[in-house]
Image: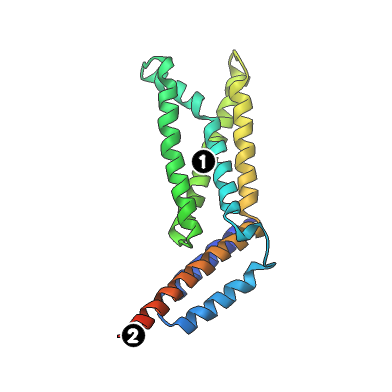
Amino acid sequence: MMKYITRSLALSRGIAKKIATNDPQQLELIKDSLKSRLGVPVGMHMTGIPLGISTILAIFCYAMAQVSLWMIIFNWLSIPEYKVLLGVFFAAAVYCVLIMTTMLLTARGSLAELKAHLFIIGLTGAGAILYFVSAFFSLLFGAADNYTPQITSVLGLIFFLLNVKWINSSLFYRSIALSLHNRVWRKQLKIEARQAQMLKR
């Protein structure tokens, strides 16, 4: 069911082990094996767009529950409701920094950051599911003043499911393969530059 997510993680894990070598020829072989996974030479996977779309969907999913969540927290702490936007803004800023950091470092071929990116998406999705259940539970067993929580909870769930479908696609997998290829290439260039400097001496 999670075929491409599993393959992305397995590929990243394998390259993280292989890249330990300092042999440029060995690195060239790793690059060639990654090239075979990229498929067509031109496409969306050759840009940062797949990771960017995943990040945007995660942010949208996260945003849907924020107002309701902070209203509950502020009411519980007896903080005036007009300060809710302060909580929303602060939490959103922290979330955006976290998810964008994992996105940028995943684009550089980091296995740990790919895992962190997927973990944040999973955590956001779990929050969206809880919000959805809570919103419809309150609709069924309580008096609803408006239907905003139900609408936003459905939207949050849709964004999460779209994100899962997106990161479990061949396009996303190929973009991960490209980021790993570029990581190997950067290491190869550094080693060759170091060797050229030693020869000059």
Mark 2 or mark 1: which is in front? Answer: 2
Quadrant location, the N terminus:
bottom right
Residue 195 in picture, x, y percent from top left: 37, 82
The tag on residue 124 is 1
Can residue 101 be seen from the camera position used here?
Answer: yes
Residue 171 in picture, x, y percent from top left: 65, 58
Q: Furthest-right residue in view?
A: 40
Taking the spot 63% from the left edge, 55% from the top edge, the residue there is 168
User: On the image, numbered disc 2 is attached to which residue?
Assistant: 200
Judge the density around disc 2: few (<14), some (14-19), many (≥20) Cα neighbours within 10 Å: few
Identity of the amino acid at label 1? Thr
Secondary element under disc 2, as helix, strand or loop, is helix
Taking the spot 62% from the left edge, 39% from the top edge, the residue there is 159
* Marks 2 and 1 in Cβ contact (< 8 Å): no
Q: Nearer the viewer, residue 98 or 116?
A: 98
Judge the density around disc 1: few (<14), some (14-19), many (≥20) Cα neighbours within 10 Å: many
